[in-house]
Amino acid sequence: MRLAIVRQRYKPQGPAERFLESALEALLERNVAITLYTREWPQTKLQLIEPHICDPFYAGRLWRDWGFARAVARDVKAARANLVQSHDRVLTCDLYRPADGIHATYLEERLRDATAMVRWRVAASPWHRYTLAMERKLFASPWLRAVLCSSKMVRDDIMARFGLPEDRLPVLYNAVDANVYSPAVRAHRERIRGKHKIPDDAVAFLMVGSGFRRKGLPAMLEALAGLPPDTHLLVVGDDRRMDAWKHTAYDAGVRERVHFTGLQTDVSPYYGAADAFVLPTLYDAFPDAAMEALACALPVVTSTKSGAAELVREHDAGFVCDARDVGALTAHLRTLLAPDVRARLGESARNAVLPLSPAAMTLKLVLLYKELLEASIAYRTAAPAAPPPSVAAPAEAPPLHGEFGLDSETLPHGDDILPPAPPAR
């Protein structure tokens, strides 16, 4: 049996790749041959994976994504793998993992309060138009057998937007290692707080992630301004407008209470220094940082468009509000100033993610691979030239909401919006 994995940029140290490699290791032990289709072969512990380099020339992100999708489609068809899993938008996959969620939904959330100029720039962007068109084509592909959703939020969005049935949308959360991320990280509290001059008795909130506007930093700065002057915010991550964000914090009157740490190779000490985790994100399919915070027994405040919100709600592990509702966000943060509330929610937070161990999530993924591989072999042995019968294209999906000029019914599709083929290397 042969499994093909498609990942344009494969980073072995990334959380998605670490989780995937655990399952792939189990498959290799079961004599499943694995080929990785990628632009560059990385250093990985799985030496038995066969690399297949697809690195066509490109200039800009449109040619980058289109050229890779085109090259992979050609090579995968020739290879005749029993099962193809893709983490990128390609039309020749059996199993798709939308790690970043649904692009159409992200754009809607991003542009809810955007200026006319920003809306026009997004609507005119060839890359956004291509990505929306490929997203629709992928979910309507007759070869697509299942979509591996990272949260129920993503699953429900795909059902509503593209019309796929629930039985083709299994939900598999990312794993979180509760041994690595645990209350034991509080041993770093004194050191990290001393480094940033945060008093031990002050309440410190933590945000983790790059791209601060998407992560909800504007709302958090406004909320912090409405909290007592002894509350602090640690911001771990990077943004190309870092100086501008520091000025924004100054204008909000909270600059001395906001500590920008930059990127950190190890975030766990900052979980130990914090009293609660905040992520009022505009859109996140399943933020790993929120899961790590829960495992560290930190209450989590996040937005309705975060995949982590469903765990926070189900397990009473914090609070959920609209990403732009500064009043609600402020009220939730004020509630967390009480130590007994933080202790109660923190205990629930850790219990919420204990079942999501790497071993448990890996087993679920391996079983799904096994089921799909066996079904694929059985069908293609009987009818190798036709797509699997359970993969009938879904009914015509409802149009994307077109408030920002990107109504999918008027979008050109696929090659209609692409530049000429790039020259050979």
Image: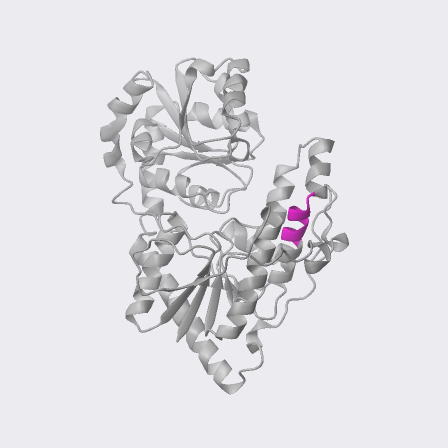
The residue depicted at 57 percent of the width and 70 percent of the height is 143
Would you place residue 284 above or below residue 220 in this image? below
Q: Seen from this angle, which residue lies furthest bottom?
A: 382
Q: Is residue 338 left or right of residue 200?
A: right
The colour mode here is: one colour
Q: Can the viewer see residue 226 in this picture? A: no
Does 126 lie within the magenta span? yes
Would you place residue 221 above or below residue 138 in this image? above
Indicate the quadrant containing the C terminus: top left, top right, bottom left or bottom right: bottom right
Does 220 lie within the magenta span? no
User: Magenta-highlighted stretch: main secondary structure?
Assistant: helix
The residue depicted at 45 percent of the width and 74 percent of the height is 82
Residue 72 point in image, percent of width and height? 53, 64
Residue 206 point in image, percent of width and height? 40, 29
Q: How many marks?
A: 0
Q: Is residue 420 left or right of residue 350?
A: right
Residue 227 point in image, percent of width and height? 46, 17
Which quadrant holds residue 276? top left
